[in-house]
DNA sequence: TTGGTTGCAAACACTTTGCAGCTGA
DNA sequence: TCAGCTGCAAAGTGTTTGCAACCAA
C-alpha cells in the first residue's frame, strides 16, 4: 500500500539522467581505499534505476531481484558508504521507516499524496518560498531535503 | 519573530490550557461503551501535561514515572482509542518513529532543530504561506499538521 | 454479571553488530 | 598479501497481537 502508479510525479527522466554522478563511483571508492564489489554494483544499479527516494527495505527487495543472495546487512552497510560519498541521503518517509533520497545534490523536498500514494517533488522555486517564509518567521533555517509533507495532489482533491 | 525567541519553543502553557477538550473524556468514553480505567487516566494526565507532540516511547516513559507498572501495549491501545476520539493524531517524527500530536484541533506544523533538539511551532500565518505556495506550484493541498521540517533554529545557526 | 481492558509474552518488521572467512586491488 | 567486505546469526528497537485474568459499569 505504498505504491505510486499515479500520473507521473517525480518521474522526470532527468532525475536519473543526472545519474552521470554515479559514473565515477567505482573509481571514487577505490580512490578512497574502498572496494568495488558485485554487491555494491548491484545496489548502485538499483539506485541508478530508481526514482528520487526509496526505503531501505525496498532497496533490499530490488537488489534481490537482481541477485537473490543479497543480504540486508550488506545493503545497509553499502548505503552508509554511499551516503558518505554524497550519493544518497537518508531521511524519514511517511511509513516511518528509513528512506533514502538518491542524488540529493539537487536539494528538494517531497509531497506525499495520502490518497493515491504518489510522491511529488517540491520545485526549487517553491522550496525557496517556504525556506524564506520560515526564516522570516522564526529565523529558522530548514533543510528542505529532509522534508516530506502529506496532503492531496491535484488529481485527488475532492 | 518576537513571538518565541526564548529557549522555550512550543512551551506556552496555553497550549494545554486548551486542555479543556480533555475534560469530558471519561464520560465520552463511557458514552461510547468504553471504560475509564486508571491506566487511561494516567495516559490522559500525561498527554494533558505535555507539549504538542510526543513519541509513543516518550509517553510510555512518562506514564511509567506516574505508574511504574505501565505496559507498552496498553499505551498503544489507549492511544488508538484516543485517536478515534480525535484527541491525538499520529504521524511520524524525525526519529522515524510514531509520533503523536496532542489536540490536533489547532492545525500547525513543526520545526525541529537538529542542533538543540527543540521543536517549534510554525505559526499559522507562515503555514498559510507554505500551503499557498504548494497549491500554486502543483495544486497540492498539504496537511500541515503532519509536517515537521528539520533545520536549525535562530540560536543554532552557523 | 459481563464485555471492555489489562498485563504478559511472544511475534513482528526493520536495522545494527560481531565475527570468521572471503576477495579485490 | 591483507585490509576491506560479505554473509550469517544474533541482538536490539519499537510496535502489534493473542489470550487468560481482571474489573468498571
Image: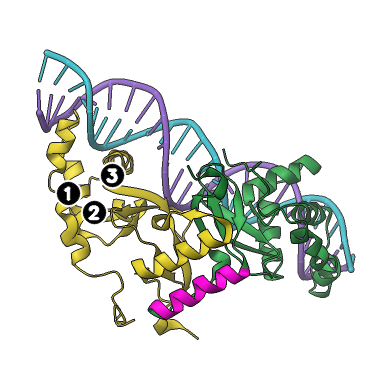
Chain colours: A green, B yellow, C cyan, D purple
**What chain does mark 1 sit on?**
B
Q: x, y (%) of residue A155?
A: 57, 45
* Rendered image: mark on residue B86: 3
Q: Which residue is mark 1?
A: B22
- Assign a secondary structure to mark 1: helix
**Badges 2 and 1, same chain:** yes
C-alpha gap between disc 2 and disc 1? 9 Å
Q: x, y (%) of residue B36?
A: 15, 37
Q: Of B122 and A34, which appears nearest the observer? A: B122
First-in-chain label (2 vs 1): 1
Q: x, y (%) of residue C21?
A: 79, 50
Q: Is residue A158 magenta?
A: no
Rendered view: A109 above or below A156: below
* Quadrant showing the N terminus of chain A: top right
Question: Where does the magenta region start and end?
Answer: A124-137
Category of crowding for the residue at label 3, using alpha-carbon neighbours closer than 10 angstroms: few (below 14), some (14–19), many (at least 20): some
Magenta span: helix, strand or loop, mainly?
helix
Rendered view: A141 above or below A65: below
- Assign a secondary structure to mark 2: helix
C-alpha gap between disc 1 and disc 3? 10 Å
First-in-chain label (3 vs 2): 2
Find out whether the residues at labels 2 and 1 contact each other: C-beta distance under 8 Å: yes
Which residue occupies 33% across, 56% down? B58
Category of crowding for the residue at label 1, using alpha-carbon neighbours closer than 10 angstroms: few (below 14), some (14–19), many (at least 20): some
* Rendered image: mark on residue B47: 2
Rendered view: B15 above or below A151: below
Category of crowding for the residue at label 2, using alpha-carbon neighbours closer than 10 angstroms: few (below 14), some (14–19), many (at least 20): many
Q: Quadrant of residue A105?
A: bottom right
C-alpha gap between disc 3 and disc 2? 13 Å
Amino acid at each position: 500500500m505504498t505504491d505510486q502508479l499515479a500520473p507521473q510525479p517525480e518521474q522526470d527522466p532527468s532525475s536519473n539522467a543526472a545519474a552521470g554522478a554515479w559514473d565515477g563511483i567505482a573509481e571514487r571508492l577505490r580512490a578512497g581505499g574502498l572496494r568495488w564489489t558485485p554487491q555494491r554494483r548491484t545496489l548502485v544499479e538499483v539506485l541508478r534505476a530508481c526514482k528520487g527516494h526509496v526505503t531501505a527495505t525496498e532497496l533490499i527487495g530490488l537488489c534481490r531481484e537482481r541477485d537473490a543472495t543479497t543480504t540486508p546487512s550488506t545493503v545497509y552497510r553499502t548505503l552508509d558508504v554511499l551516503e558518505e560519498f554524497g550519493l544518497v541521503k537518508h531521511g524519514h518517509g511517511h511509513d516511518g521507516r528509513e528512506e533514502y533520497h538518491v542524488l540529493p545534490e539537487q536539494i528538494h523536498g517531497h509531497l506525499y499524496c495520502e490518497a493515491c500514494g504518489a510522491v511529488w517533488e517540491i520545485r526549487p522555486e517553491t522550496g525557496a518560498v517556504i525556506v524564506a517564509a520560515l526564516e522570516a518567521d522564526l529565523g529558522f533555517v530548514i533543510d528542505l531535503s529532509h522534508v516530506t509533507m502529506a496532503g492531496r495532489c491535484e488529481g485527488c482533491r475532492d
